[in-house]
Amino acid sequence: MRYEIQGEPMPVVICYLNNGEAIKCQQGAMSWMSPNMNMSTNAGGGIGKALSRAFSGESMFQNVYTATNGDGMIAMASNFPGTIKPMDVSQMPIVAQKSAFLASEMGVNMEIFFQKRFGAGFFGGEGFIMQKFSGQGTVFLELDGSIVEYQLAQGQSMLVDTGCLAAMEASCSIDIEQVAGLKNKLFGGEGFFNTRITGPGHVWLQTMPVSNLAGAIRPYIPTGA
């Protein structure tokens, strides 16, 4: 499979498939495609996998598109301003924010990733449930705003504002750290907690979590007269 990503800030990934090759994607992700792409909707591994996807913020069913009678093309667009990030999970599983999945090659597996620490799940902004991708191939993730990447060494940490962690290699760990000082908590505008990410591993940070975007435009939304 070949692919290209076009457009900002509402990107689209265009995938070119060989005859017989298939790609799976989130329901409603397809924007346009060649007429020889055959669509099949299924639970993608049975009811257990379907429920797992539902808990991680995705629909229970997935669409599989297969190129038939020759090579095919399919395009899948992002649902909000941000970045479509391709990630190869063959070398290291990836843990991503809830609802990040857009599409992937057939060899990629998605499962629930539970936060092991209560505090990180409750206060860290990423929630108790995230998505974990493993197997063979490329997964395309929908991330918020622009993406900045860091490679953390063993034991190296970084403090991240709530919701700014988009994805990380599964070798990383996350916890929460309380903002020091009562005045900082009450008047600093950064909340009471930050997320601490500890390496080793690669980290992808997002500049505009969709919750922050919603908060920024809320004052401009007309209310009832």
Image (tube, rainbow, N blue to C red):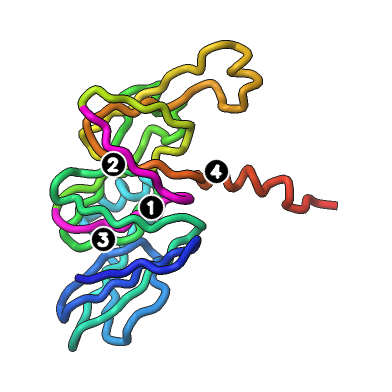
- Give the number of the mark in front: 1 or 2: 2
Three-letter code for the amino acid on which mark 2 is drawn: Val
Q: Going 39% across and 55% down the picture, which residue do you hit?
A: 142
Task: Tell me, for residue 95, which label it has, or none.
Answer: 2
Label 1 belongs to which residue?
A: 58
Q: Secondary structure at mark 4?
A: helix
Is residue 21 toward the left or the right of residue 117 in the image?
Answer: left
Identify the mark nearer the N-term, 3 or 4: 3
**Residue 20 pos. (x, y %):** 15, 78
**Mark closest to the chain's N terminus, 3 or 1:** 1
Pointer 2 or 4: first along the chain: 2
Is residue 51 among what the camera can see? yes
Kind of residue indicated by mark 3: Ser
Sequence-first tag of 1 and 4:
1
Q: Residue 56 magenta-drawn? A: no
Circle 3 sits on which residue? 104
Q: Nearer the viewer, residue 203 or 193?
A: 203
Q: In the rendering, which numbered label is found on residue 211?
A: 4
Cβ–Cβ below 8 Å for labels 1 and 4? no
Q: Is residue 55 visible?
A: no
